[in-house]
Amino acid sequence: MYRHLERRLAQHIRDFLRRSYGIDIERIVIEQPPNVRFGEYALPLAFELAKKLRKAPRKIAEEIVAGIGPIQDFEKFEVAGAGYINARLNRAALALAVAKDEEPQSEVPSGKILVEHSSINPNKAAHIGHLRNAILGDTFVRLLQYAGRKVDVQNYIDNTGVQVADVVVGFQHLEKKSLSEIEQLTRRPRFDYYCWDLYARTSQWYEQSPENKKIRLRTLHELEQGGNETAAMAELISTAVLRRHLETMDRLDIEYDFLPRESEILRLRFWDAAFEKLRAAGVLYFETEGKNKGCWVMRRAGTSKPLTAENAEPNESAEKIVSEEDQKVIVRSNGTVGYVGKDIAYHMWKFGLLGKDFGYRKFFIYPNQHQCWISAEQGERDHQHFGDVAEIYNVIDARQSEAQNTVIEALRGLGYDEQADHYTHFSYEMVALTPRCAAELGYELSEDEKARSYIEVSGRRGFGVKADDLIDKLIASGQKEVDSRHAELDDSARQKISKQIAIGALRYFMLKYTKQSVIAFDFKDALSFEGETGPYAQYAVVRATNIFRKGGIDPDAFAKELGRNISSDELGKFLAGKGDKDKDKVSDADELWELWLAASKTAYLVDQCIATTEPAYLAKHVFQLSQLFNAFYHRHPILAEADERRKKFLLATAAVVRRELIRALGVMGIEVPPVM
RNA sequence: GGGCGCGUAGCUCAAACGGAUAGAGCAUCAGAUUUCUAAUCUGAGGGUUGCAGGUUCGAUUCCUGCCGCGCCUACCA
């Protein structure tokens, strides 16, 4: 509702300005006052107009307030400070709409969105960095779906790179395993853990002698060639590890629709199709001199444009102007294509611009019967089709932003500006370990590393916290709490609750930091169930649920019927501020109003998260709402309330907050246990 | 060297578009429960927002310079 009223206000102001001043302002800035005493919306409009109209801001604000006229569901407008215009809502009207759960639909663009996230190399266990990626990505998918968008979820699998070759080398040369022995090992419960250690050991082994490094190169060639035992091993290992990753993510309720693999991008020759177009468009050109001699190169993204309509010298060509270090090699002098090239082709496919498609094969069925597909050279006849989308979001950490920008530049170079504009690199910072955490895990640190505030994880060193280990720890620690509080419940019920709490804690933890902040991981913070955590919010809901359970009332139905139980006038009285006296003090009614107002903001927050690709706003909102509720809960013993009318009002307050908390937590992928 | 980002309380982080008194959690200290279970609540202390300028009615936010830190900058993927 809050969002809807804000739009109504903006539209009205726009019309008013045009009518009264002949001024057109496309974007009316509307802020939220720091305190409900100032009203629900604040407009710094007069400051902006002061220059144009050559009048004092305060004077303009007074004029606007005097002339603006009534707006439905708004009570009044006031001038505050040096020229703010504060808008006050009709509290009862908003409360009634919130209680009835009326949220006017906004227009939803019809195009399909592709969100790609996770993309874990299938050569070792997933770690906490991958958890951040998957949780951000999955939450963003839920945000889009909540807003009514159609979304395909993809997880890109790089199954042909050196990392996979490294594990194959480990099995062949360090472990001396045969194909069938490896096949046995893949059936073990945590095969990805086995690979984690082996990958780290193999990386060390390379350092021991140049001979070993030669083996690595030879293996990589065999892998690229295909049709041999090495390639078969790689296929076996990467597929087994991939299955493990899907299981790990499924523990967090994260699912995928399609798994495109690099092996198919290679074998179906996506690059060949892309190459022709890139060359024809002049995006790609052949370098004949210098260190990149013999390569097909592109101008590096972010470097100043050498040739544009304005500055182009007619007789000069692009390659003369781009300096060596501004070149990005796309095709090596030996004719093989690098990773960025494959990515360009892949993204042309995403937008339906390549003229080629994957084969599709069924791969994994989730316990809820959701089908996950995988790419194949020769797919099944009946299959779902992916790609051809209107917008894409790639959840990839900030370290890859240059590569991402290069892909976008390539699309622009091909003339696909529309698509380039709808290509979003959903960039986030990495998860690193605090030195204390690294020491706890038994890693040897240099003096240099000990002094830092965080240390980057490294799969190559086997340095990091594995995703499943963290989830296990969280569940165990949740279980301890649940066992001590709910001895009356049976084992399976307690286990289920422990799991919900663990996932709530983990997902909230990964979402509460803003994207650009490096998470310095520490078990103490991650395992906390108190303060600004997921369980704190879950607990607020459980408390609300308990009230209704004890009272024998269905909370959602109760909220919807509020209008029949309490008149609008009465509701207004319960929510009315004290007016002019006690201006400095927040009244009891104001505090209740704050709760209702916060509860009305779910759709508003979802929009904001999508527009800024920042799920942390929703996490903050959930925490704030929980905090307000817990204070409310403590202050008002609802079931003991003697005044029947007031009791109904307080019950409705709890019901509405509970409903919105469950909703917002759901968007974050967090379930709420029945008891805690 | 170049590109991107960061620097806010003891620690970990907030502060959308420049706005009203820079806020939370943790930790520390002091309190609260015969009640809808305290995974909770109330309160206290803790800040020259890295430094110096500039733009503005107004700067944690924008611009410039400096200091410190991280990431990227491969014919690896």
Image (cartoon, coloured by chain):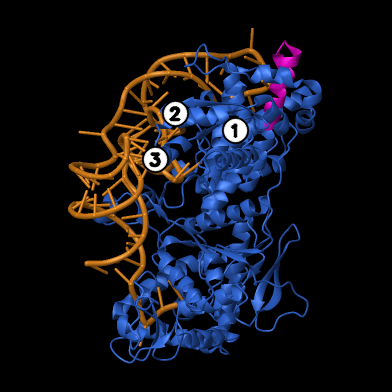
Q: Is residue A143 above or below residue A156?
A: above
Q: Which residues are magenta?
A: A639-656
Report in which chain the residue with disc 2 lies: A
Residue A104 sits in quarter? top right
Q: Which chain is orange?
A: B
Residue A352 vs residue A330, the one in the foreground: A352
- At label 3, which amino acid type do we have? Lys
Q: Main secondary structure of the magenta part?
A: helix
Q: Which residue is mark 3?
A: A51
Indicate the position of residue A477 as horizontal and vertical percent values.
Answer: 55, 41
Q: Which mark is residue A59?
A: 2
Foreground label between 3 and 1: 3
Which color has been applied to chain A in this rendered view?
Answer: blue
Regarding residue A252, the answer to whether it shows in the image is no
Is residue A403 depicted above or below B56 in this figure?
A: below
Percent position of residue A308, x then y: 39, 76
Marks 3/1 same chain:
yes
Number of numbered labels in the structure image: 3
Q: Are marks 3 and 1 in contact (CB under 8 Å)?
A: no
Which residue is at a point 70% across and 20% down the rendered structure image? A571
- Return the disc, 3 or 2, that comes first in the chain's sequence: 3
Magenta span includes A649: yes
x then y, percent, for residue B24: 46, 32
Residue at position x 35%, y 89% from top? A287
Q: Amino acid at mark 2?
A: Lys
Callout 1 amino acid: Ala
Regarding mark 2 in the picture, which secondary structure is present there? helix
Q: Is residue A611 above or below residue A52?
A: below
Pointer 3 or 1: first along the chain: 3
Q: Tell me, for residue A598, which label it has, or none.
A: 1
Q: Which chain is home to disc 1?
A: A
